[in-house]
Image: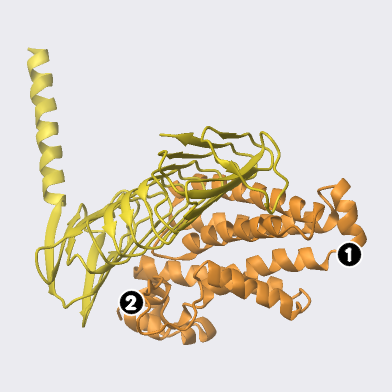
Chain colours: A orange, B yellow
Amino acid sequence: MNCAEFQRELPEFMEEGGNAASQAHLNDCRDCSGLVSSLEAIIREAKELQTSEEPSPRVWNSIEIMLRQEKLIREPQTSGHRSILPSLRQHWGALAWLVPTAAALLVGVGILLYQQRPDNARRAAVAKPAGPAAGANIQTADTSDEQLLQEVSARAPMMRAAYESNLRDVNNYIRDAQDSVDADPNDEEAQQALMDAYGQKSMIYEMALDRSLP
Amino acid sequence: MQRSQYLIELGAVVIVAIATIAVAETKKEYRFEVGPKSKVSIVNQFGSVSVKPSTGNFVSVTATTYSDKVEVDQSQSGNRVDVQSHLLSGANAENSRVDYEVLVPADASVNLESATGPLRAERLHGDVEAEGANAAVDVKDMSGGHVHVKTMAGPITLTNIRDGHVEIDSVSGDVTLTSVTGPLVRVSSTSGRIQYNGDFGYAGEYRFNSHSGNIEATIPDDASVDVTAQSVRGLVQNDVPLQPKVHTSFLVKEGSSFAGTINKAASSVWLRTFSGKIHLKRR
């Protein structure tokens, strides 16, 4: 069995464990075993997020806008429009949606936690930048980040330090941007900065989870 | 006598090492006939990718591998050429490096990926997308195509890019733009430095933002721009004689923001950082 054949059978493999041939290929192929590890990590993460309440349509709209800005999803292309397709589909085949979904879940958790914060807590956050919801946000990010770093360590240990350092920078960016929005919820530039900050974080996740870039 | 023996042994070790490297290094060339506006994708895990224009309607890929732990997969589907490094069992960052030298028709669109890089492209008219966590990216002498670059820590250098959208995202890599103009030039960074040297073209939109990285732009006296700059916590400095703007979206505060125009204000320049410094300089 080669990689293409294995990836065609990947949905069945993920659900039922696959047959002997696919298991044998998995043992021999670093690419495919890395892919399966990534999928399992995403599934674990998604299951944890299922405990969250269903967000409002506004949340999904915000996520969609952000993903379009980040080019993780695209407007329908006209024939004259140039297209730079991401590499995800080419590597992940029918499962290409999983990486943007993971990024969307990450961004969604951030936005959801921000929007669920009560107004009085939001006002209090001006005086106390690290409010309870912010704490939960950071905690969620810490858990996700740690899983991501473990994934990076498994594939390319030499890259872990760089990912760790950059995640720390981006988390600081998110925290400062969040504080700016808390201070003035109507400040469009602060809102944009928060979106940019989450955009940078989703880029790190995209790079780490895209198996072509360990 | 002992010294001679030592030198002989050392020489033997060196010869064996060189021979081993020579044997391990394998160079293969792949050639594909393509039509106009072809699409070429080179996906590498570890190692460099360098793309230059070819002299005809063909794509030439020369791949150098250094062990048997990695192989090069390649395919062509019509006008699309895909090449990727395929790691085999036992591969790691040290033994799975592949270096690619690629020639493509000048109007081809290229997609380049490598975690370690470097990634280089020059003298093309098609779109260029380059992505790599730690890869240094160097793109120069492009016109007419869009240039999209994403890195986590890798530095990005763009030189002499015209007439296309330029979109750059880097978390901590320094971004250096020299003579880069187009309808849209956007740089987004967390902690990397953003440096622009040029005249901001005509009727373009330039948006540079960072969290803690400094932003520095150097422009000539004949530049035609409408510029706003703001840093929440950092210092903002302007050496260019600007006509102050009456209406701004923020309160202009000496030392932390400025807004103004020079000449006909043809291009819009938007500079934002949270804790970095902003410096607009005269060339």
Q: What is the C-alpha distance between the residues marked 2 and 1?
A: 50 Å
Q: Which chain letter matches label 2? A: A
Residue B171 position (above or below residue B76):
above
Percent x, y for residue B238?
Answer: 56, 35
Q: Residue at x 38, y 64 (%)?
A: A212
Query: What type is the residue that disc 1 sits on?
Result: Pro
- Element marked by disc 1: loop
Q: How busy is the neighbourhood of tag 2: few (under 14 within 10 Å), some, or many (20 plus)?
A: some
Q: Nearer the viewer, residue A79 or B263?
A: B263
Label 2 element class: helix
Q: The C terminus of chain B appears in which quarter of the rendering?
A: top left
Q: Which residue is mark 1?
A: A118
Q: Is residue B205 left or right of residue B164?
A: right
Write down the quadrant of residue A24 in the picture: bottom left
* Mark linked to residue A3: 2
Task: Choose top left, top right, bottom left or bottom right for residue A91.
Answer: bottom left
Residue B263's place in the image compared with B103, above or below, is above
